[in-house]
Amino acid sequence: MYTIPFLISSFFIAARARVLHKYDLTQIDPRAVCNDGSPVILYTDALPPGNNTDYFVLYLEDGGHCYDSESCEERFNANPDFVSSKGRPRQIEVFGFLNQIDTLVHTNAFVAFLSYCTSDSYLGDFNFTTNNGLQLQFRGNVATRAAVQFLKNINLGGGVKQTLLLSGCSAGARGASYHLEQVRGMFNDNLDVLGVFDSALWIDVDTYDDVHIPFREELRRFSRISNWVEIEKDILSQECVNRYRNESWKCILGEYQMPFVKPPYFLSSSQWDQFQLNHNLGYHIQFFLQKSVWNYIEDFGLRSLEAIWNVSGSARSSGCYKHCVSTTDADFTLKNSKIFPSFKEAVQEFLTDPNTRKFYRPLCEQFDCDCCDTNEFCTWVKVQGEYVCTWIWEGLVKMKNMIGGVIQHEL
């Protein structure tokens, strides 16, 4: 048995997992291939689904992207699992949201997990040759549509009243949010298509220094190498494209895109998203010991909170310094206080009444509020009559002995 590494927490090895089985999507569409031409793999519950199955889940895997010749060559050479399905196992184990979905919907759901090897956030249908002659295929859009067609072939949309949850985390959540309206258009009124997006909300901010490329520039570059005219026409919100006509790359950057995504959907995004903060700061933990970086982090958190408030659907803005919390049992059920709901509780409330917009704001606006647990570097603050843990600058000063760093109040 094989377990996808980022779907399991070492603290929950003993937890009972959901086991999914391998299916080759080129049997649906021969063009559903990875960057290297190997077939895209869909992992599913055992076939066929039960006759009374009325809940289906299509979950899109995370894994970043590439956006120009240099980044695509680096991805191909450094991370072969991100560009190929070669060596993919016959079965995988999944935890978190996918493992607990039956409890959330009070019935036996059918789960499908779309493995990610197209490096395009599920948008592409184009070929690209790098400066060094590396030939790559980008078929994320083809693979997504093939996965939906697979579900249609096993009776999705054929029942009296069914529900499809289109979900994912990180690049997968971004892809799911791009495709939500397109997938709705593939079915009649007998199927409700709801979105559940984990960590999809990129915000448009500068990086901390000039060394690292902001997400906005990555998306601009992707739009130049891709089949962008078709992506604009066939996938993206036309309202968004019309709003940002000369900068339509904004329609794949969450801060600009999510207000145009048609509800009902549920978005969970950390106010201090670990992936984007690490990217913007250069992945150096020592940076956290510099006062000027701490100021950057605080400003980032305020921008994130503003962005998530403006999305069109239901949203949960966690105060945690985390990313992709739907993929492990630990993060999916994390609840340090009585006031703020876990991801699991918030999703359950959304699924009970998806047409009523709900917004869950973090208890406090300090870094990693209510998530840093009871270690010596935390500071406890009282919020709405309850003590929660958070990081503040004075607490970070205590960290210097842990990593041998020197506190720098200014660069």
Image (cartoon, rainbow, N blue to C red):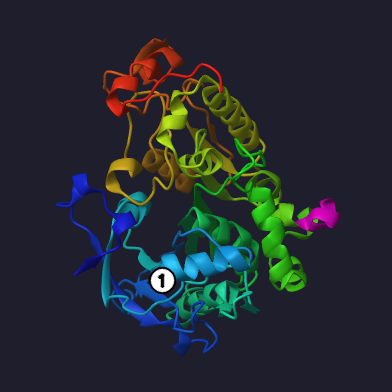
Instruction: Decide if residue 149 is on the left or right side of residue 127.
Output: left
Q: Residue at x 33, y 58 (%)?
A: 107
Q: Is residue 145 visible?
A: yes
Q: Is residue 252 visible?
A: no
Position above or below: 153 against 120:
below
Q: Which residues are magenta?
A: 241-248
Q: Position of residue 383 (x, y in %)?
A: 43, 13
- Give the main secondary structure, helix, strand or loop, of the magenta stretch: helix
Which residue is at a point 44% across and 38% down the rendered structure image?
Answer: 284
The amino acid beneath tag 1 is Pro
The quarter of the rendered structure image containing the C terminus is top right
Whole-percent x, y for residue 364 in the image = 48, 20
Residue 194: name its quadrant: bottom right
Q: Secondary structure at mark 1?
A: helix
Residue position marked by numbered label 1 in the rendering: 80
Residue name at image x 17 percent, y 52 percent:
13
